[in-house]
Amino acid sequence: MDFLTFRELMYPMGCFNINQVLLFDAHFDRNNLTRWCHKGRLLKLRNCYYAFPEYRQQHGFSRYVANRIYAPSYVSLHSALSFYGMIPEEVVQITSVTTLKTAAFDNSFGSFHYHNVKPSLYFGYEIKLMQDRRGLLFATPEKALLDLLYLNPFYNTEQDMEQLRLDEDYMHSEFDSERFASYLNKVGSEALDRRAATLLKTYGL
C-alpha cells in the first residue's frame, strides 16, 4: 500500500492503531509506519498508535488522542475542571481516569496521564462532540471534582480545599450539588464523604 492510499483510508480516523490498518490490508508492511514517521508524514503516539501531523492544528484534538491511545478512559481531574472553568489554571497535561493500570505517555500532541480506579468507580462521564463531530468521553464537572478528591486524599482540610481555587461563581451557579451527592452515595466511602463535606463547607454549599 502506498502512502497516498494509506492516507486516504486512515486520515478520517484521526487517530488509529496497527490493528485498524490490518483490517484494510492484512499484508501491510509495518515497516512503512516507521519510514513514514521518520519522513514526518506520520506521528507515533505510543506503541502501535499513530496520527497524521495535520491534526496538531485542530483545537482540542489532544483530548481525543487521550481517549483513543489508552481505553477505556475519560478526561477528568484538573483537565476537566479547567475545561469547565472551575479552576483558573490552564492545564498542560491531560489527565484521565481509567480501569487499566496507571500510565503516562508523551507525544507530539502533549503529555497524557491516566489514573486507575476500580470498575465500580468508572462512571459519571458523558460524550462530548468536537468541532468535527468526533465524540470523546469527558467527566461531568461533579465527577471530575469527585475523582480529584478520591485520587488525592491529601486534600483534607478547609485550607487544602481553598488551595484548589475553585471558581466560587461557578460553584454557586452551575455546580450540581445533588448530582455530586448522588455520586458520593454511589462510591460509598465515609472518608470521601468527610472530605467532600469539608469542600462544600469551604465554598459555602
Image: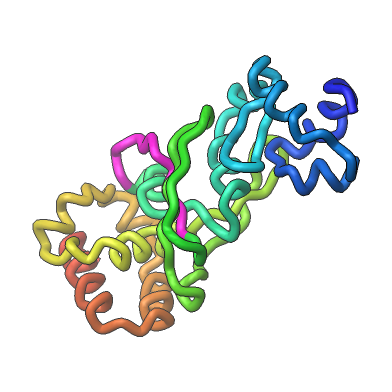
Q: What quarter of the picture does the N terminus occupy?
A: top right
Give the magenta part as a residue range: 87-97
Q: Which residue is at a point 36% across and 77% down the rendered structure image?
A: 184
Would residue 19 be found to the left or right of residue 66 on screen? right
Q: Which residue is at a point 71% across and 41% down the rendered structure image?
A: 16
Would residue 136 be found to the left or right of residue 99 on screen? right
| Relative height, residue 58 to residue 143 (above, below) | above
Q: Nearer the viewer, residue 74 or 47?
A: 47
- Residue 93, by quadrant, is top left
Reply yes or no: does residue 20 show up in magenta. Answer: no
Q: Which residue is at a point 36% across and 38% down the rendered structure image?
A: 91
Q: Which residue is at a point 18% across and 58% down the rendered structure image?
A: 161
Q: Residue 194: percent from the left, percent from the top?
A: 20, 77
Q: Nearer the viewer, residue 31 or 92?
A: 31
Q: Residue 145: percent from the left, percent from the top?
A: 35, 60
Q: What quarter of the picture does the C terminus occupy?
A: bottom left
